[in-house]
């Protein structure tokens, strides 16, 4: 019997590539996105159900889960991939920006998990993969809201193991480093320094350094990491992926807080 994976944020980037990989592996795929009417490729692939899901809309979450179960019978793996980023000085962030960051990256992720769990509990099996980031384990300047949301995802996922492992449900974290996707264009809010004194010059330097940051073009590596997390039948929790991710995490483990902060500042804003 074919297994079925449910993927959020499937219209582009990591999500879209992951849809294609799981299909190649012989799985049924529920590819969810905010605007499925704009999708012309994935919707033509046999065994791929393209359906609407906005992680900030509980009704659309429920409808997508029901459509997937109706089409394929059950959901074996959930990939929480939908994400949103913000960049700027915390003091300049509006309440709307702050709430949106957490509504998409954290509260929406929780609601999707809650919608999927009844079926997994019934079958006493399943895997929940949350696409986090190296930004859930270490930090860059002017990314406070994004890091806070990803640190929250890391803590939620690690703790949720205690509740769900006894029911046969595994939890996984995939932690990509820097990749050339359209995340910075479609899913990033550069709200900046707001003209506030003291922030603009270091923020401008940071953006300049960020534009020069080495980004991998092989987003298939992330899809492969998600596939490994879904199929390795282990209790391994974290799957960092990308040369910069592995390197920075190793460096972070070797340095104390002050040394790491000094090193990152020297590379990004000084």
Image (tube, rainbow, N blue to C red):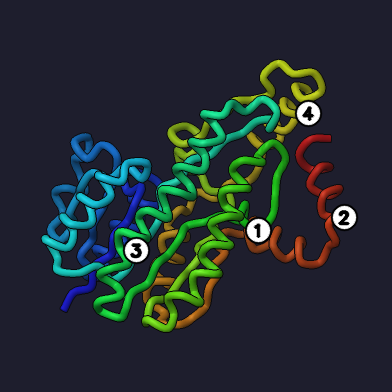
| Circle number at residue 137 | 1
Q: Is residue 23 left or right of residue 157?
A: left
Other-residue count near label 2 (Cα within 10 Å), few / some / many at <14 / 14–19 / ≥20: few
Whole-angstrom CA distance, mark 3 to mark 4, is 39 Å
Q: Residue at x 61, y 33 (%)?
A: 87
Whole-angstrom CA distance, mark 1 to mark 4, is 23 Å
Q: Which residue is mark 2?
A: 259
Q: Which residue is mark 4?
A: 202
**Res 113 quadrant in image:** bottom left
Q: Where residue 239 sits in the image (x, y, percent)?
A: 53, 68
Marked residue nearer the N-terminal end (3 or 1): 3
Q: Which residue is mark 3?
A: 78
Other-residue count near label 3 (Cα within 10 Å), few / some / many at <14 / 14–19 / ≥20: many
Whole-angstrom CA distance, mark 3 to mark 1, is 22 Å
Other-residue count near label 4 (Cα within 10 Å), few / some / many at <14 / 14–19 / ≥20: some
Disc 3, SS:
strand
Whole-angstrom CA distance, mark 2 to mark 1, is 16 Å
Q: Are marks 2 and 1 in contact (CB under 8 Å)?
A: no
**Is 137 rendered above or below residue 86?**
below
Looking at the image, the residue that sits furthest to the top is: 195
Marked residue nearer the N-terminal end (2 or 4): 4
Name the residue nearer the viewer: 150 or 227: 150
Marked residue nearer the N-terminal end (3 or 2): 3
Whole-angstrom CA distance, mark 2 to mark 4, is 20 Å
Marked residue nearer the N-terminal end (1 or 4): 1
* Total marks in image: 4
Disc 2, SS:
helix
Q: Residue at x 61, y 55 (%)?
A: 151
Pick the quarter of the image with the N terminus: bottom left
Q: Are marks 1 and 4 in contact (CB under 8 Å)?
A: no
Q: Where residue 25 sits in the image (x, y, percent)?
A: 27, 70
Marked residue nearer the N-terminal end (3 or 4): 3
């Amino acid at each position: 019997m074919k297994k079925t994976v449910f993927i959020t944020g499937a219209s582009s980037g990591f999500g879209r590539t992951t849809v294609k990989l799981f299909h190649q592996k012989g799985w049924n795929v529920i590819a969810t996105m905010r605007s499925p009417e704009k999708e012309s490729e994935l919707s033509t692939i046999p065994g791929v159900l393209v359906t609407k899901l906005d992680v900030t809309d509980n009704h659309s979450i429920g409808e997508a889960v029901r459509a997937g179960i109706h089409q394929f019978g059950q959901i074996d793996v959930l990939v929480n991939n939908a994400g949103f980023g913000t960049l700027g000085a915390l003091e300049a962030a509006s309440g709307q920006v702050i709430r949106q960051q957490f509504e998409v990256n954290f509260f929406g992720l929780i609601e999707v998990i809650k919608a999927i769990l009844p079926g997994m509990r019934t079958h006493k099996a399943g895997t929940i993969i949350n696409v986090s980031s190296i930004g859930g384990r270490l930090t860059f300047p002017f990314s406070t809201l994004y890091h806070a949301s990803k640190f929250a995802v890391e803590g939620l996922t690690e703790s949720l193991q205690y509740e769900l492992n006894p029911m046969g449900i595994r939890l996984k974290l995939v932690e990509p480093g820097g990749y050339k996707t359209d995340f910075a264009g479609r899913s990033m809010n550069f709200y900046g320094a707001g003209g506030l004194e003291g922030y603009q010059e270091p923020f401008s330097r940071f953006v300049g350094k960020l534009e020069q940051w080495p980004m991998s073009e092989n987003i298939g590596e992330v899809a492969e990491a998600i596939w490994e997390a879904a199929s390795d039948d282990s209790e391994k929790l974290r799957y960092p992926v990308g040369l910069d991710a592995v390197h920075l995490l190793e460096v972070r483990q070797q340095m104390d807080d002050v040394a790491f902060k000094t090193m990152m500042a020297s590379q990004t804003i000084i």
